[in-house]
Image: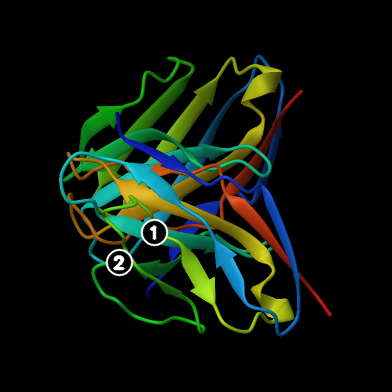
Amino acid sequence: DTEVTQTPKHLVMGMTNKKSLKCEQHMGHRAMYWYKQKAKKPPELMFVYSYEKLSINESVPSRFSPECPNSSLLNLHLHALQPEDSALYLCASSQTIPTYEQYFGPGTRLTVT
Amino acid sequence: AQRVTQPEKLLSVFKGAPVELKCNYSYSGSPELFWYVQYSRQRLQLLLRHISRESIKGFTADLNKGETSFHLKKPFAQEEDSAMYYCALMDNQGGKLIFGQGTELSVKP
């Protein structure tokens, strides 16, 4: 399996809801990433996990909470989001850090109402 | 400061014409540079990286340290090349990709 998968594909949530995004890879990669991407803009890094430990947090608001339960799985827990958080959330993985290539998932399209 | 600049938001060419997408970077040391492509409704994927010096889908990119540039070129554009292209730089800690703002390439028939 050489792909990064993300579920759900689409998510609509209210500002008081709690939801989670899921990312999975079975390539044996030990680094995983969350990005946020607005339309026609580059991805913005949110978090990096290396060997299941959080190694980079790009000053992301606490309403976004990442979790890496094992080397294949990455979650992003969402709570009390704002409409401006609506975006495409991308997961990526790489063999290690430093890395020569990051493999991206298809993303979850999040709409906050 | 580490930075990637793509000066063109949109580049429109006709099929069969040469295309060059510009990328300039700011980095102290030896940079690790990449081009990523995002076709409509598809995932972001690596097109090429400077260390491998490969040609992918007819695209090449040469690192010019003197001009701090890593421009992407293709001699004959195809309609299927229409996509968003991002130049990216690996930061000096190796964990973060610094993306340019992207250039949308439109190849007209």
Give the residue type that dot 2 points to. His
Give the residue type that dot 1 points to. Phe
Outermost residue, right direction? B109
Residue shown at 15% from the left, 44% from the top:
B29
Quadrant where the C terminus of chain A is found in the figure: top right
Do marks 2 and 1 share a chain?
yes
Q: Which mark is residue A107?
A: none
Q: Position of residue B18 (x, y in %)?
A: 63, 77
B19 with respect to B82 (left or right)? left
The residue indicated by pointer 1 is B70
- Chain ID, mark 2: B
A34 with respect to A14 (left or right)? left
Q: Is residue A102 visible?
A: no
Q: Nearer the viewer, mark 2 or mark 1?
A: 1
Residue shown at 19% from the left, 39% from the top:
B28
Proximity of marks 2 and 1: CB atoms separated by less than 8 Å: yes
- Chain ID, mark 1: B
Quadrant where the N terminus of chain A is found in the figure: bottom left
Task: Count residues near mark 2 (Cα–Cα under 10 Å), then give few for <14, some for 14-19, many for 20+.
Answer: some
User: Dot 1 lies on which element?
Assistant: loop
Q: Position of residue A12 (x, y in %)?
A: 72, 34
Q: Is residue B90 visible?
A: yes
On the image, which quarter does residue A88 sit in?
Answer: top right
The residue indicated by pointer 2 is B50
On the image, which quarter does residue A24 sit in?
Answer: bottom left
* B47 w.r.t. A51: above or below: below
